[in-house]
Amino acid sequence: MNPQPNRFFQISLVFLVALNLIPHFNDYTVPTLAVGGVCLVWRLLYEFQYVPLPNFFTKFGLVISLSYLIFLNYGTLFGLEAGSALLICAASLKLVDRVAYRDAMVLLFLNFMLLLARFFESQTLGITIFAFFDLIITTALLVQLHSGAHFKFDLITLLKTGLRLSLQIAPFMILLFFVFPRFSTQFIRAQGGAAKQAGFSDKIDPGSVAKLAESNVVAFRVRFNGEAPQMIDRYWRGAVLSTNNSMSWGRGSGQATRRLPPPESKKGKIEQEILLEPLFNNWLFTLDYPVWIQQRNSSIGSMTRFGEGDIYFLQKSYNKKFVYDVFSTQKSREPLSTSLRKKYLQTPKVEDPRVLDLVSQIQKNNVDGEQIALRLMKFYHTQFLYTLKPGQMKSNELGEFLFEKKKGFCEHFAASFAAVLRMANVPSRVVVGFHGGRKNDLSDYYIITSRDAHAWTEVWSDKKEQWLRFDPTVMVSPMRQELGGDIYHSLSEQELQQRFASQDGAYEIDSSWLQKGLLAYDALATNWNLFLLNYDQAGQESFFARLGIGQVNQNLLLTISLLILLIFFLWVRLTTKSKEVAESAVQKSYMNLRKYLLKKGLEKEAFEGPSDFLNRCQKELPEVAEDLESFRQIYLESEYGLRPPPSDFNKIIQRIL
Amino acid sequence: MKKREQIYIVPTEYGLMYGAGILVSLLGGAMYNNNLAFLLCFFLMALFLIGMVQTHNNIKKLNVEKMTIFLSPSESVGHGVIWLKSHNEGGHHQLRLRAKNGEDHLDSNIANIYKKSLHPHYFDFKTGAWGKKKLKKIKISTRYPFGFFHAWRMYPVSVEYYVYPQPSGILKLESGEFEGLNKGAHLQNNGDDFSEHKKYEVGDSQKHIDWKAYARGRPLMTKKFNEGDRQTFLIDFDKTPGNLERKARQVSQWIHGCEEQQNSYSFRFGSQFIPASQGPRHKMTCLRILAAMRDVK
């Protein structure tokens, strides 16, 4: 007879499942909302409005239909994403099922699995905190389920039970976490699925954009090992655009992929540790100019590619956060071959006399590319306006932007700048990436958000034989470069004007309590994320090295883990309340008496109480019957009554013995 | 003297499912280099071990002090009481008491036994054929607190109990069937005369207690009545027609009939003779003799 869950338990369980579906909403919107939401509403209608639950055939139909839909969507019923969607559907459908003991156990088990599926999607601090409370509630409900139908529901007691168990487990978990060997799982490595959303584009067409949507989604976080470069030098390159069509730029096809540059001496290099967010992770952003990068995760390392324009990217999307290290120098080392020169000079024929006139002006005296670029920069100085709402251009032609529209954002300026330079026979290209970043002083790292997204140009100097960065946006809005995109876009027009007029030192970031709190949380979350992502086989080795233990064998770690498991088991056995209650003096005497009586051939039967047993003994041993009767009375009074035994009761035992 | 407690423990089907979950989270952690999956795995593992120890402890240091099974009708529901003594500081929760003796089947849940206490648990059980029976062992099991493990312990009890035949039969109490005074008199006779007081004993009919005397401060007494014209019957098993089963059921029916009508009856089976009387104790004596005619091993 298994305990049957009462109604209160059933409702608690329904809410727990609903709670566990919430974190999946972002990644599995359809199963969570369409299946989970509908089933939850149905269940609540059943609980409070007595709407009947679906019958077997309806549920069977739902299972088949949902499995088919998942198969259609993912092309399989296996794998991480299809498996997670199936789990969400299974847990949701259980909501519209009756909750007997078996169902309750399955639902609680599904909760653990939903949590596991969530961990595969993200390992943020938020999810960790959520999991902590979720596990406490799930454990508490597990205990309640086995406490019987008559168990009086007391949330505080239950949570206390859950918390007590969790705290009991915590030291074991932490110890095992550090010690359990992290294996290199090349042979069973799982690949992430395709990225669900592109967070960064490798082509620009600013003329077609009427208004740039502002969002401050975090793209990546950077921690510098050493001094961080100044704001004006904090350019992180993503993609290099080489194909030009008036105001539009793209990567073009057939870009050569090169061998990854080998590591060099770290001396003189700017070292960065970058924690990249999933939305932006097809491109591996690197501070200008990268020399080489180092992947910490071997599976991501095998997907890393190096391409034309000193760019790094992943062969396949990897839709999870990960960490990599970048080593940069202040000067570009990329050479320019004859074939590439031709490529970087490609431009469509422009017949607009205004543009041709501009080109001839900057080309005067046949000077170096750098000089020509500097002349063009002046052109942008006074005549242009920086705005995120430039409105759509009529023809998307270079002349229209340079001489009529004259307003736009970084993409407009970079696109037109590089196009004019190409017409002036200067090899140039557009680089898209990020510029700026807001420092989190609490943990000494920079947060780069989508508001820092930026486009600039690179110009080849024959004299210096290197690519030089030119950012025409600086000429239009110097504040954009001085403050960085995130802060710049968070300020109003008035604040920007005030700031521009004052010309004092660095701009102080908002120091409201909310802002401080958010930065503190971000610092905590980032460190937690970095810790979790970095604690792999290499992380474990360096952890033990820091402890002074040196090289530790994986087999040894596995043995230690098993030993920890054994010690934990013994510790639980010792500490769990199973100690025998200390016997009273009368009880001890009774046990001695039983030993004596056993020698006389009188053994207490299991069905006999002490009273019946001693009565039987009186008949068998009439010579001590009187003393046995006295002891029986004392025993009953002392053990089952409230009267303490007389001080001389031992004499009675001695007489019998 | 002190026998080692033999407690058996195995994972339940849910424990196995949970174990598979631990394995999945471990593999997931390794495959995806996912440290939170590892943490979850270790949490589940620890909970599994705690569950094993607590399930084991829940049945540990629990003794059967005494067990009694009351006289019960066959093919019906019987009752009994078991006295369990906890020597455990943690107490015991959600125990399941089970026993099977032929067709008799006991399955009862014990909610809680508090620490260091003596706990009487009254139970019902399904009875089968009638007879004198002996329950040799009982099983006490538990799945508390997580349901991952099933722990049980067998207790030798050697409890003798009697299951009397289910009352049935269509034979009437004809005068030829009985011996004794006032043969053939009416069964419905309530005109007894008071004769004397008798000290109350457990099992005496409560309707004869002299409450007035008790209210005046006298001990609890029952009123005895003159036989007067009250009927007294002899139920003679050997003279009852039919095979053993039919005879037993018929006699059981007569005993219950006499009790319902508050008539005195004597009972004879072979050389055993129970003098005429009436009341619960007398009924139990007669039914026990009736049940003991068949010794069910």
Image: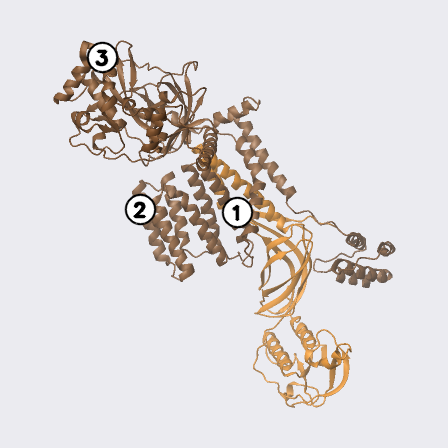
Instruction: Give the mark nearer the N terminus: 3 vs 2.
Output: 2
Measured Cα–Cα span from mark 3 to mark 2: 53 Å
Quick check: A126 left or right of A591?
left
Measured Cα–Cα span from mark 1 to mark 2: 33 Å
How packed mark 1 is, by other alpha carbons closer than 10 Å (few <14, some 14-19, many 20 or more), is: many
Residue drawn at x 60%, y 47% is B54
Quick check: A655 left or right of B164?
right
The chain ID associated with circle 2 is A
Judged by depth in the image, the label closer to the viewer, 1 or 3, is 3
Find residue B114 and report its image quarter: bottom right
Display colour for chain B: orange
Q: Which residue is mark 1?
A: A139
Judged by depth in the image, the label closer to the viewer, 1 or 2, is 1
Quick check: A118 left or right of A647?
left
Instruction: Give the mark nearer the N terminus: 1 vs 2.
Output: 2
Display colour for chain A: brown
Same chain shared by disc 1 and disc 3: yes
Same chain shared by disc 1 and disc 2: yes
- Which amino acid does the dot numbered 2 rest on? Leu
How packed mark 2 is, by other alpha carbons closer than 10 Å (few <14, some 14-19, many 20 or more), is: some
- Which amino acid does the dot numbered 3 rest on? Thr
Q: Which residue is mark 3?
A: A338
The chain ID associated with circle 3 is A
Same chain shared by disc 3 and disc 2: yes
How packed mark 3 is, by other alpha carbons closer than 10 Å (few <14, some 14-19, many 20 or more), is: few
Find residue A201 and report its image quarter: top left
